[in-house]
Image (tube, rainbow, N blue to C red):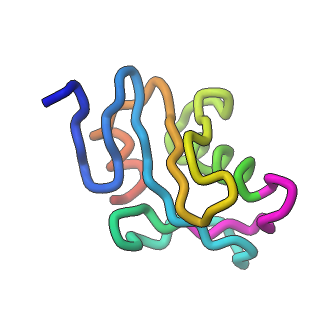
Amino acid sequence: MNGKKQTGCIVQDGDGVRVSVHVVPRASKSEVVGLHGGALKVRLQAPPVDGKANKALCEFIAGKLGVAVREVVLVSGATSRDKVVKASGVDAAVATEKLGV
């Protein structure tokens, strides 16, 4: 392997993990609702305007993983429902457990 360990939609990447996410904005509450294809399906209360959903996603993932918001960054998908976020300081096994995958 090339140093990356894959666990479904969560991939170990250096000192953290990359999480593939399918976002459903304007939901009644923010929550993980399972899988959508090969991605974690997340409903967010935030609307998809002015980056609000992207910011809310990073805050939501940070809260679920127990890391600071600054440790979670959007890697790709800024204008798409399919996104990839990287969370530093988290192991893939821990992230899988905390995100319920």
Residue depicted at 50% across the width and 48% down the height: 84
* Image position, residue 51 (x, y; %): 80, 52
Q: Count the marks: how many?
A: 0
- Would you say 35 lies left or right of 64 here? left
When asked about the image quadrant of residue 15, the answer is top left
Q: Horizontal and vertical percent for residue 10?
A: 34, 47
In the rendered structure, the answer to whether residue 95 lies left or right of residue 88 reads: left
Is 39 left or right of 28, judged from the image as shown? left
The residue nearer to you, when weighing 17 against 68, is: 17
Q: Is residue 60 magenta?
A: no
Q: In this view, does 49 lie above or below 97?
A: below
- 48 in the magenta segment: yes
Judged from this view, the residue extending furthest toward the left is: 1
Q: Which of 40 and 37 is in front in this view?
A: 37
At horizontal 34% and vertical 39% (from top left) the residue drawn is 94
Is 81 rendered above or below residue 52?
below
Q: What stretch is highlighted in magenta?
A: 42-52
Q: In which quarter of the image is the C terminus?
A: bottom left
**Image quadrant occupied by the N terminus:** top left
